[in-house]
Image (cartoon, rainbow, N blue to C red):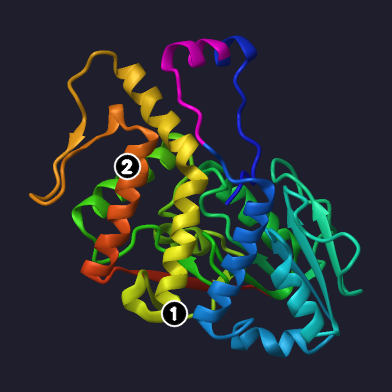
Amino acid sequence: MGNRLSRKRKSRRARRKTEETIKTPQVDRLTVDEQIQSMTDDYYYFKWARGDLVPEWAKTTLNQSCSVLEIGCQTGCWCMEVATEYPHANLFGLDINSYFPTTVKPVNCNFLQIDLDGPIQLPDASMDYVRLSNMSIWIPQAKYESILQECVRLLKSEGIFEWTAVLADHAIQDFQPQRVGPVQEAMNQKMVSFYQSNHYNPLIAKDMQRLLCQNHHLTIITPPNGAFISVPVGDWGGKIGAAAADRMSVYFKSIKADFLDYLRQVHHSAGMASPDASPLSIASPAISWETMTSEDYDRYCSIWFEEANHYRTYTNLYALSSMKSGS
C-alpha cells in the first residue's frame, strides 16, 4: 500500500506555495514496517480467499523446468512460496521498492528493484509464465499498453500471461465494493476521482479483456468473464470478512494524507465555489469534502465499516489469463 511507482514531484518553490495556500494538516502515514506488514497480510489474505497458491493450469508448467516472472512482487511472498513448492521453477520478482529479502530466500528465487518507466532488462522470450501483480492503482492508465507489450516480449511462444491487481493474489479486484450504504458510496466515488486525478484507473478490471484482446499476440484462455470470486467485507462475513475489514482499515490509513491533500487542492483550485457536499441518508449527515478534517475522515471510515455490516458488503475478485501465440 506504499508508493510503488515514481510520481511527478513538485519543484521546491511550487511545493512551498502549495503548503502556504492549502495548509494541509499533518497526518500520520504508514511507516515502512507497516507497509511491509500490510503487503504480507494482503498476500496471505488473498491466498486464503482464493484457496490455492497458483491456478490449476499453472501447476503443469511449474512442475517442469521453467522461468517465472512476477511484476509487482511487493515483499516477495508469492515468489518465495512458489519457488519452495516448485523447485524446478526459477522465480524472478520485480518491484520498484526493495521490500523483498536479499539474502534469506530460496536458491531458485531472485529479486530485482526496477522502475517500469523503461524496458525490463531481461532477454526476449525468456519466460514461461509472467504475472502482473497488484498494480491496478500503481500503473498510470497510459502505460498499460506498453507494459503489456513488454510482458509479451518476455514470454516464450505459448507462454502464459496472468494479470492480477489491487492487493489481490490471482485476482483482479473490482475497486468498488457491492451492496454499499450511502457513506460507502460517496467515499468510494470520491476515492475513484482521487486516483483518476493522478492518472490511475482503479476500475481497470473493466478494461482487462479489451486490453488483452487488442494485443494480437495473446489469446485469453480463462472463461470470457475470467475467474470470479466474491469476498465479504466486515464481521458479517466471519473470519475472512473480518480480515477483509482489517485490510480496508489499513488501506484507508495508507491513503489518508494524500486523499485529504487532494481534497484541499481541489477546493483551492475551485476558489470560492459553492460547497461540495454529498447528501446521504437521514441517519448520516452530508459529507462536506472541502472542509474535511483528519477527524472527519476517521469518523466516516468508521461509518463505512458500520455500513459494511449493515448492508452486508462484499467485493468481487476477477482474473484473466492468456497465452502467447506460437511463432
Give the percent coordinates (x, y) of residue 8. 61, 28
Give the percent coordinates (x, y) of residue 59. 69, 88
| Residue 107 to residue 273: above or below | below
Give the percent coordinates (x, y) of residue 20. 48, 11
179 relative position to 202: left or right: left
Q: Nearer the viewer, residue 183 or 7?
A: 183
Circle 1 sits on which residue?
239
| Residue 135 to residue 218: above or below | above
Quick check: is 25 in the magenta stretch?
yes
The Cα–Cα distance between marks 2 and 1, rounded to whole angstroms, is 29 Å
The quarter holding residue 318 reads bottom left
105 relative position to 324: left or right: right
Circle 2 sits on which residue?
190
Quick check: is 5 in the magenta stretch?
no
Q: Which residue does the image show at 64% across and 82% down from the upper left?
A: 53
Q: Is residue 170 visible?
A: no
